[in-house]
Amino acid sequence: MARPKKKTTALKLKPMAGYALIEPVELEKKTAAGIVLPDTHDEKSQRGKVIAIGAPQITDSGKEIKPEFKVGQTVIYKKWGGDEVKLGISGRELIFVKFEDVLAVVK
């Protein structure tokens, strides 16, 4: 009997040099004190998981700039940095961020 074909959900995007692809992590809907925030509290997340990294960026002077983070790490990036992209029917939101717009790695 033939095996059913597996559906592949692998993302087939490779960022250009100097860019990383990040999947934003949703903000908490409840504060540390237990206060539930309303849906109208529409603040953008600045934290996300690195999905893919482009090649090192080459400056005009020939210097190579490599990212200080890896795929799979959670990072904090500039609030208004990056370009949002919605993928396919699922509506999955991802952000393309320049290496220099990543502010920290969450440990």
Image: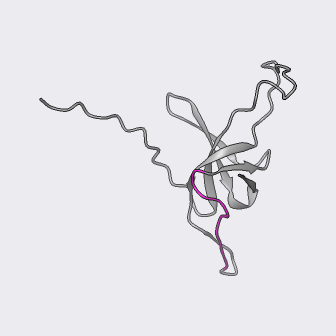
Compared across the picture, whether 53 is left or right of 74 comes to left
- 26 shown above or below 83: above
**Image x and y of residue 24, in percent:** 66, 40
Q: Position of residue 81 (x, y in %)?
A: 75, 49
User: Quick one: 82 or 70, which is closer to the camera?
Assistant: 70
Q: Where does the image place residue 26, in percent across and percent down from the top left?
A: 69, 33
49 up-or-down from 103: above or below: above
Tell me: residue 68, above or below residue 29.
below
Q: Is residue 4 magenta?
A: no
Look at the magenta stretch and give its main secondary structure: loop
Q: Residue at x 67, y 44 (%)?
A: 48
Q: Quadrant of the N terminus?
A: top left
Color scheme of the displayed model? one colour
Which residue shows up at 63% across the image and 46% down it?
49
- Image quadrant assignment for residue 4: top left
| Residue 65 rendering spot, x and y as whole percentages | 66, 71
Is 84 above or below relative to 35?
Answer: below
Which residue is at 57% across, 54% downward? 71
Residues shaded magenta: 63-72
Q: Tell me, yes or no, whether the highlighted magenta stretch contains residue 65.
A: yes
